[in-house]
């Protein structure tokens, strides 16, 4: 995804772009080996959808024509957690919903029409080619996967967008350079997904259903998401010893335990229940698992020496826990940055590479903080500074209000969709009710002994 968007973004300012891809994507949308995440729910956040539309005008219509329904992330969503159900109202947080293979297929077809972009499929990029002093990258060595034929492609700029499995560490080490430090926050979340069809009499008034159990009741969640061809992608997730099973009955039982009424009896809502729907559905694919979900940030921006003519972006730099749905949108933000950097002559400047990686790091910081702030807490990495304790209490109070306060709900989702900065959550109209709730929560904790768990709570393992 990062590579396709980078190619499109660069094509407005350079003569020619070649996309090197090790897979041979088919002539219809289907999961492929090089992007195994394509078998799991892939939601495009509003920020990503807006950038995609700027890079590829008319893309949303192309997706619609390919069968992807339009989803209002508030109006069409049934979301419940331990606080109850989130409100539903019409919003501007709207994107096309589809499987990752369809999204990729439609984008690739658009990029294929670009006369300045060509594709070299079934080809591995396996080594950087540099000047003798290793100061500048001047191309890549390639290997054709079927024939083993070796070749070299010379280029003014090489962009590594090869995802989590990027070989950049080895490549830089082979040039005698120090690889970057890595920051990893791993909540050990495992996904299990399948595509289903609902019975013909199923006429839902929603397109997205999410049931999420947050600590202390558990760290599990699940959802179903309307995609193309009137089918639904169902993904269940759980951390550590709460991983979703990959067999039919275990899958449905896991979904049953997400029932919000089981966790918080007084938070009951009229929303349909995932396990009821799942039990009525017809499976269209096997259940597949995925475990490589850690947040991983490779700090290329900190390197003193980076060869000119080489930049990295997408998951090759920063990959997120997918539960926050930020990866494709952050890749799109990186592609926009790349376009601007080339337009400003960044690739020709001394230290241009470092400047790009620094600007990218600044872009990545917000989604990184959003993802790891929650995950670090979930795995017990506790930063005891007063500021962090305050932030956690603030976010908890804010989340508690999202279910009853439309304004706070929208403000929270604007930040989650990366269209507004986290600082917007501290605007006066938001901060006041949140602070009042914080004070009330603290006062009630001080005045009450800890309650014994209810029968329903006791059923659920406390992580
Ligand atoms: C389970 C799961 C669910 C996710 N859900 C969401 C979601 O809901 N929303 C969202 O926005 N993001 C989601 N993501 C993240 C998203 O998939 C990525 O962030 C996004 O695709 C950008 O990644 P990328 O393009 O950098 O890498 P990838 O998408 O992994 O693409 C890398 C490409 O490089 C190719 N390649 C790798 N090495 C080489 C090589 N040496 N030579 C040639 N080709 C090579 C691969 O074949 C592949 O095509 C999810 C991720 C996972 C794992």
Image (tube, grey):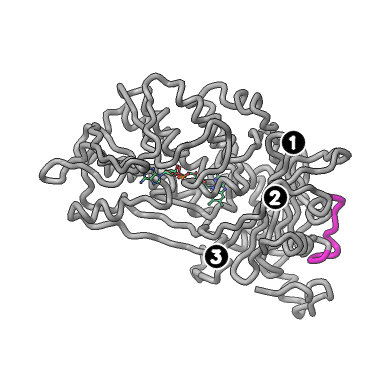
Residue 279 shown left or right of residue 40 in the figure: right
- Measure the C-alpha gap from mark 2 to mark 1: 13 Å
C-alpha distance separating marks 3 and 2: 20 Å
**Furthest residue toward top:** 115
Taking depth in this image into account, of 311 and 132 the one nearest to the observer is 132
Of callouts 1 and 3, the N-terminal one: 3
Q: Earlier in the sequence, mark 3 or mark 2?
A: 3
Q: Which residue is mark 1?
A: 230
On the question of residue 408 being in view, the answer is: no
Check if mark 3's residue and mark 2's residue have beta carbons within 8 Å. Answer: no
Question: In the picture provided, is 223 more to the left or to the right than 6?
Answer: right
Query: Can you identify the residue that label 2 sits on?
Result: 234
Image: 118 above or below 127:
above
Point out which mark residue 188 bears: 3
Give how far across and how far down residue 371 sits, in percent: 53, 55
Q: Which residues are magenta?
A: 262-272
In this rendering, the label closer to the viewer, 1 or 3: 1
- At x 20% / y 37%, what residue is drawn? 138
| Residue at image point 24% right, 32% down | 155
Element type at mark 2: strand
Q: Camera-side residue: 23 or 98?
A: 23
Q: How far across and how far down the image is residue 342, in percent?
A: 31, 30
Which quadrant, please, contains the C terminus?
Answer: bottom right
């Amino acid at each position: 995804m990062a590579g396709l968007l980078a190619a499109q973004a660069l094509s407005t300012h350079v003569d020619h772009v070649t996309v090197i891809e090790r897979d041979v994507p088919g002539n219809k949308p289907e999961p492929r080996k090089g992007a195994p995440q394509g078998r799991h729910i892939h939601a495009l956040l509003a920020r990503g959808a807006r950038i995609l539309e700027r890079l590829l005008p008319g893309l949303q219509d192309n997706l619609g024509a390919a069968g992807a329904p339009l989803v209002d992330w508030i109006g069409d969503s049934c979301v419940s957690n331990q606080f109850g159900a989130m409100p539903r109202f019409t919003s501007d947080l709207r994107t096309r919903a589809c499987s990752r293979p369809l999204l990729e297929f439609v984008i690739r077809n658009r990029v294929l029409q670009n006369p300045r972009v060509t594709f070299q499929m079934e080809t591995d990029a396996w080594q950087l080619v540099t000047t003798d002093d290793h100061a500048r990258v001047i191309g890549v060595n390639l290997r054709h996967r079927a024939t083993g034929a070796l070749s070299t492609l010379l280029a003014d700029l090489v962009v590594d967008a090869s995802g989590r499995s990027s070989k950049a560490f080895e490549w830089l080490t082979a040039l005698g350079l120090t690889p970057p430090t890595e920051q990893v926050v791993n909540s050990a979340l495992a996904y299990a997904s399948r595509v289903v069809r609902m019975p013909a009499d199923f006429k839902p008034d929603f397109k997205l259903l999410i049931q999420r159990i947050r600590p202390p009741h558990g760290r599990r969640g699940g959802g179903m998401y309307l995609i193309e061809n009137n089918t639904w992608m169902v993904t269940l997730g759980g951390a550590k010893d709460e991983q979703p099973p990959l067999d039919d009955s275990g899958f449905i039982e896991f979904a049953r335990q997400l029932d919000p009424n089981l966790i918080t009896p007084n938070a009951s809502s009229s929303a349909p229940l995932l396990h009821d729907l799942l039990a009525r559905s017809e499976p269209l694919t096997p259940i597949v698992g995925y475990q490589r979900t850690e947040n991983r940030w490779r700090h290329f921006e900190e390197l003193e020496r980076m060869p000119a003519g080489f930049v990295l972006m997408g998951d090759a730099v920063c990959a997120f826990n997918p539960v926050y749905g930020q990866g494709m949108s952050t890749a799109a933000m990186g592609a926009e940055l790349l376009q601007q950097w080339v337009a400003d002559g960044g690739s020709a400047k001394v230290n241009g590479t470092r400047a790009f990686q620094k600007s990218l790091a600044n872009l990545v910081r917000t989604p990184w903080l959003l993802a790891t702030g929650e995950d670090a807490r979930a795995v017990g990495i506790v930063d005891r500074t007063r500021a962090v304790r305050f932030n956690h209490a603030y976010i908890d109070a804010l989340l508690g209000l999202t279910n009853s306060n439309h304004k706070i709900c929208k403000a929270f989702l604007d930040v989650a969709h990366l269209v507004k900065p986290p600082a917007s959550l501290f605007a006066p109209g938001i901060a006041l009710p949140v602070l009042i709730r914080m004070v009330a929560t603290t006062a009630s904790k001080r005045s009450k002994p800890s309650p014994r768990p209810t029968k329903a709570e006791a059923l659920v393992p406390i992580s």
